[in-house]
Amino acid sequence: MNLVGLYTLFYKEVLRFGKVLLQTLIAPVITALLYLVVFGHVFEGRVQAFPGVSYTVFLIPGLMMMSVIQNAFANSSSSLIQSKVTGNTMFMMLTPLSHLEFFLAYVLASVVRGVLVGIGVFLVALVFTEIPVKHPGFILLFMFLSSATLGTIGVMAGVWAEKFDQLAGFQNFIILPLSFLSGVFYSIHSLPEFWQTLSHFNPFFYMIDGFRFGFFGISDITPARSLGIVTLFLVVLSGITLALLKSGYKLRD
Amino acid sequence: MPAISISGLNKHYAKVQALDHINLAVERGEFFGLLGPNGAGKSTLINILAGLTRLDSGQVNVLGHDVVTDYRRTRRLLGVVPQELTYDPFFNVREVLRIQSGYFGLHKNDTWIDELMAALMLTDKASANMRALSGGMKRRVMIAQALVHRPEVVVLDEPTAGVDVELRKSLWDFIRRLHREGHTIVLTTHYLEEAEALCDRIAILNLGKLVALDSKKSLMAHGIGRTRRVCITTEQPLGPLPENLAAKVRRQEGNQLELQLDKSADSVIAVLDVLRAHGAVIIDLNMEGADLEDVFVELTRRNRA
């Protein structure tokens, strides 16, 4: 294993988003804050998703996870498409980096960005309200697994896309709707039965539900089931992505 | 053990046979030229060597190691300067070179990076963002990137394409220095002049086929690169030419005549005298040095003979 190579690519990816912090860290925290202010103001006192939990507090873990999901995806996918469009992926392809090292570096950098954005949303939300933390281990575990999963999807999308337009389509028609319809703003028990059933096919639902359990000790389904499904999802997607990278798909002709 | 050995190499894209059963070897310490017009297959060959392109069949080794099965070792032995000018707009020159070193497993490489930047006149640009550099500077950074891991074999894919005369000269000097220091150099170019000036041995590719592989001296001894092309326009279309001139005709259409003359043996004045004596009224004359097309014409003619 070329550990220095892996670390270098990881470091490069972190340095890359670190150079544009306004766009990669500050902007997503402010967006989440706007959602919190607007939705919290409109629905506070009218909706109670979990017993004994105010709507604003209920909303915070959902917004954190939505930010983690979107930013972890954006990190690997946008870096890869930029490198492909400018042609500088070549400088990585000429080196002894293996497909596994390449994959791990991109995914871990996505985890760092996802986790930093999630923590940023949490810290800003603390200014407005107190947030219970029942199972911190679950919170960290779900944040890691979810950002790694979305970092992996980002690698797939970044390798597949040949232009920014295709990547924007992937983000707007797959990632954004799935993250919005995963229970960020509501408990799925408040939905009609058909939509409840459909929500169970959305992998992002398990990320948010398990993550919320870490804060409140309450969830729509058992946290062990969420953990199992999210882990399985990560393992399967990682396998597919590694196979794609090993084949040289759209990276080596 | 050769620096590079290629045997039975084939590669096709859709219906195009980009490389057709290529066999060649580059010896250690050699300055090797890979020539051919655009689309000849030079870059495909380099990309297979570098692992950017997958081969269909055949075997490619770098210092005895297979580029497919032992890619980690071959990529450490090879420094490749790609043809296209590309860069990462997020980083400055020093960051780019440190990152490239890291990919090769080199964590602390600043002494060599400083030496490289000095040799390529990049020292005062170390903190400049890649976006702020001129095309020539970017090209030099790409050369430094290819050399950060001190590779034994250096492959330069058309390093002087589209660069000005001054930079071309300084790049030639730098590449010569690398060769003197013991690196094996493989240079692809479509400038015959460049190969003539630098290379010990030359391979010529055309349409994916190896059409010549010989030392520069031998190729020159056979007349390649020692001819000039003369284009003559006459007032009236010319009839059949005298036998001694007909052998030198490359093309004859109406009142246009194109001749390939030996630079040392054939006198242009004597040729014009022969044409005038034959009744031709010459209204225009153009002369050009031999280019690769002439080499191909000559090689094709030789192959047919």
Image (tube, rainbow, N blue to C red):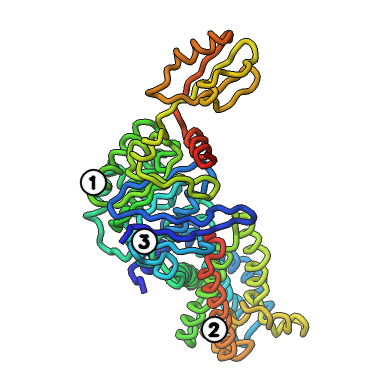
Q: CA distance from mark 1 to mark 3?
A: 20 Å
Q: Amino acid at mark 2?
A: Thr
Label 1 SS: helix
Residue linked to disc 3: B62
Label 2 SS: helix
Residue linked to disc 2: A231
Residue A21 in the figure: left or right of residue B166? right
Task: Indicate the position of residue A8 as horizontal and vertical percent values.
Answer: 36, 64
Q: Amino acid at mark 1?
A: Arg
Is mark 2 in CB contact (under 8 Å) with mark 3?
no
How packed mark 2 is, by other alpha carbons closer than 10 Å (few <14, some 14-19, many 20 or more), is some
Residue B166 in the figure: left or right of residue A235? left
Task: Indicate the position of residue A92 as horizontal and vertical percent values.
Answer: 43, 60
How packed mark 3 is, by other alpha carbons closer than 10 Å (few <14, some 14-19, many 20 or more), is many
The C terminus of chain A lies in quadrant: bottom right
Task: Indicate the position of residue A68 as horizontal and vertical percent values.
Answer: 53, 71
Which of the pair B193/B53 is nearer the observer? B193
Q: Of the numbered discs in the image, which one, if any, rests on residue B156?
A: none
* Residue at x-position 66% and y-position 78%: A202
Residue linked to disc 1: B180
The N terminus of chain A lies in quadrant: bottom left
* Residue at x-position 51% and y-position 12%: B274
Q: Where is B197 relative to A76, above or below? A: above
Q: Is residue A78 visible?
A: no
Residue A252 in the figure: left or right of residue B226? right
Q: Amino acid at mark 3?
A: Val
Q: Is residue A52 visible?
A: yes
Which of the pair A13/B198 is nearer the observer? B198
Is mark 1 in CB contact (under 8 Å) with mark 2?
no
